[in-house]
């Protein structure tokens, strides 16, 4: 089984390759197919944006396509940055600038009130077939400053209190067992045969 990941984000692609390897599917990226496509994320929810990307690329390539839309939702900021997580500080999708802006907007918020969660919605689409969805959510806190150098995106400031480490302080193997993306993919795995097999 070959699955196209509808993303140009190298961090996400690396995680998906590791996660899909657990149940025998081969992953290819847009780069692998020499495709330079950036599907506009015009939806108002994670689910809508994931569907837009999966369905567009599936119809374009004729391949089984997986897309995700994920982001960080901070309670003290009324759920921001949410669906705008990647472009929080501007259209250039600069992770360091995004983190700087986030920490700046939380500077007067005490540690106990910096609750947040990561959410990931996966959409799996086949040409001329239905689109199915899986969702994962990971609860945590936003730190006062960056911790760790691994991971990508907001990982250096997303702390899991029960482990007292940020995602960026964990190795890939540990993160890939507990992350929002891992939880969504586990839900996808449980439904893989009925969703993908049923529409072959």
Image: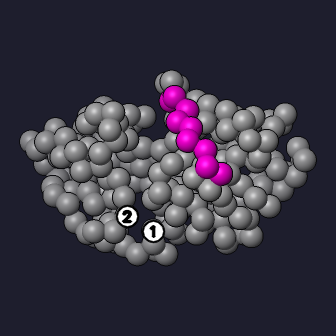
Looking at this rendering, what residue extends furthest in the left direction?
Answer: 108
- The stretch in magenta equals 33-41
Q: Nearer the viewer, residue 155 or 96?
A: 96
* Residue 133 horizontal/vertical position (percent): 67, 42
Residue 39 in sight here = yes
- Residue 34 lies in magenta, yes or no? yes
Residue highlighted by disc 2: 151
Q: Tag on residue 59? A: none
* SS for callout 2: loop
Main secondary-structure element of the magenta-colored stretch: loop
| Residue on which the image places disc 1 | 175
Q: Residues within 10 Å of mark 2 (few under 14, many from 20)?
A: some
Determine the secondary structure under disc 1: helix
Rendered view: 87 above or below 142: above
- Is label 1 or label 2 in front? 2
In terms of image quadrants, where is residue 84? top left
Q: How is the image coloured?
A: one colour
- Relative to 149, residue 191 above or below: above
Q: Earlier in the sequence, mark 1 or mark 2?
A: 2
Q: Position of residue 155 (x, y in %)?
A: 33, 58
In the visual, does 184 lie left or right of 95?
A: right
Q: Position of residue 26 (x, y in %)?
A: 71, 64
Report the residue at 76% width, 48% height from top.
64
Tell me which residue sits at (31%, 71%) in the image.
169
In the rendered image, residue 38 lying in the magenta stretch gets the answer yes
Q: Position of residue 111 (x, y in %)?
A: 17, 53
Mark 1 vs 2: CB contact within 8 A? yes
3D distance between C-alphas at marks 1 and 2 = 9 Å
- Is 48 situated left or right of 59 in this image? left
- Residue visible at 81% across and 48% down? 195
Occupied quadrant, residue 67: top right
Camera-side residue: 68 or 11? Answer: 11
């Amino acid at each position: 089984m070959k699955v196209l990941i509808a993303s140009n984000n190298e961090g996400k692609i690396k995680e998906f390759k590791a996660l899909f390897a657990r149940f025998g599917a081969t992953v290819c990226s847009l780069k692998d197919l020499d495709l330079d496509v950036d599907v506009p994320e015009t939806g108002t929810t994670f689910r809508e944006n994931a569907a837009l990307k999966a369905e567009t690329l599936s119809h374009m390539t004729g391949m089984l396509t997986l897309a995700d839309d994920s982001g960080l939702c901070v309670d003290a900021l009324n759920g921001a940055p949410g669906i705008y997580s990647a472009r929080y500080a501007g259209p250039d999708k600069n992770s360091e600038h995004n983190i700087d802006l986030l920490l700046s907007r939380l500077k007067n918020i005490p540690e106990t009130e910096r609750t947040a969660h990561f959410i990931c919605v996966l959409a799996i689409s086949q040409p001329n077939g239905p689109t199915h969805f899986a969702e994962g959510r990971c609860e945590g806190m936003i730190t006062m400053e960056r911790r760790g150098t691994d991971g990508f995106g907001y990982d250096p400031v997303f702390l899991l209190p029960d482990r007292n480490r940020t995602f960026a302080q964990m190795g890939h193997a540990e993160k890939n067992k507990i992350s929002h993306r891992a939880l969504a993919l586990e839900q996808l795995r449980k439904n893989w045969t009925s969703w993908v097999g049923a529409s072959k």
